[in-house]
Image (cartoon, rainbow, N blue to C red):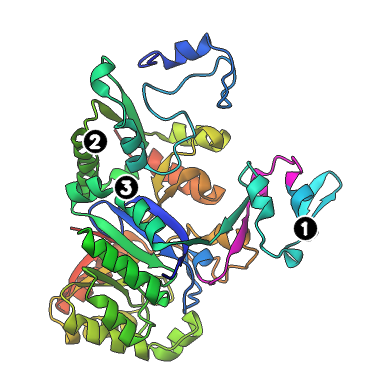
Amino acid sequence: MVDGQIINIMKYSIHDGPGIRTTVFLKGCPLNCQWCHNPESQRFGQELLYRPDRCIGCGLCLEVCPNGAIIAKSGNLKFLRDQCQVCGACCQVCYAGVRELVGKTMSVREVLAEIEKDVVFYDESGGGVTFSGGEAVMQPVFLLEMLKECRKKEIHTAVETCGYVNLEFLQTISEYVNLFLYDLKLMDSQKHQALTGVPNERILENLSWLVKNHSRVIVRVPIIPGINDDEENVALIGEFVTSLKQGQELHLLPYHKAGVDKYQRLGRTYLLPELQSPGHERLEQIAGKLEQLGLKVKIGGGSK
Amino acid sequence: MLPTTCHVYFGSVIGATADGRRAWEPLSEGISPVQGSDRLGPTAVIKSSSKLDHARTGGTLLNLKFTPQVLEGDEGLEKLVQLVRSYFKLSGHHIQFNVVSAKTLRAAQGEPEKYRDLIVRVAGYSDYFCDLSEALQEEIITRTEHVAF
């Protein structure tokens, strides 16, 4: 049985599908969206998150690092990320929470045990489990196994996907998925390529298949001011989605800045530091426009 | 010992404890997790608390903290109701909620180790307050200050 690369398992998740849910974040994504709020989810291997503001200067990391990536300099500890081999030795001794390894190998059984802990809440609220990421479908064998196990236990399953995945995989898993949360960002393929790293044709084709062949799909559009909230893109998204299905459900997810300092913790540079969250008025306008085109629109990610 | 309603007083007469609590500091409130030890969210707290045989205690108190944004709208409230119902289904006895004020958030900035459990809603997304950047914390404090109770 194949293990999964997991970032985090989040309990009481209330924005990724109906009811009280557990969201399992799988590591690795084929897209590199510049605005991504979970940059630690993009790469496939393990990574080291580093928060020097929490450091108490105990020096334990200095002693255990086998690669000389931590040095003491005029009374302070300095991290040389270039030297770091991401072995995680420092994370095990750092109790101040400065150093944290992201990405953990977990078996189907281990993840299932975590999910099952909250069954009472799923039952009470109509919730379940959401597989997100990164891109959950990029770990198809593990995901399929997970979904089959959840089906056996009668746990409602949602899969959040960017859509840039093999259609056959999508078809294979779809039988075991109760709800798809399908992200749609930009209709202009060139712009899509420039800002996410990949063109959008496959994403649109896969969505067409899914909406026509699966009983429950919610399209999710992140609203990123100045990037995809222009009239043209909104109209094109609306027209495309309506052409697939009249009255299709669509959720607008407002951009937020929660991920900005994660880039720093990963030793990366955030390319869009000036970006602000869209105002409520703007969101209402966009929602109104999409509703006119015949879609069922909601602002935010939870649902009934 | 069940320090319901008097966790501050009990703490003030008890020396340092092995869990890292310093002398004379408050104990936890009732059966609520020790300050800062709740890192896995409300469902985990509820499940742990429900493992007690509440019938033998003469009454328990479980306190959960939320910022107003987490409970926003019908949906946020509905999910709170579902939490309560689940707790009772698991034979829990008494649960109550603190909707925290901007003052509490300020305190959390000062002493994050005591407030690691504080969950805030950012924007269609929830996270631990103490894990957020200072700028974002400020933004949330400003927002919280504008919510009237």
- Label 2 or label 3, whichever lies nearer to me, is 3
Label 3 SS: loop
Q: Is residue A87 above or below residue A212?
A: above
How far apart are the alpha carbons under marks 2 and 3? 13 Å
Tell whether label 2 touches label 1 (CB within 8 Å): no
Residue A65, picture quadrant = bottom right
Residue A22 vs residue A290, the one in the foreground = A22
User: Magenta part of the protein: which range?
Assistant: A42-60
Q: Which residue is mark 1?
A: A66
Identified by mark 3, the residue type is: Lys
In the rendered image, is residue A252 in sight?
no
Q: Tag 2, which chain?
A: B
CB of mark 3 within 8 Å of CB of mark 1? no
- Distance from Cα at disc 1 to Cα at disc 2: 47 Å
Question: In this figure, which residue is indicated by the disc labeled 2?
Answer: B87
Label 2 neighbour load within 10 Å: few <14, some 14-19, many 20+: many
- The location of residue A178, given as percent across then percent down, is 21, 68
> Where's the C terminus of chain A, which quadrant?
bottom left
Q: Residue at x 23, y 86 (%)?
A: A209
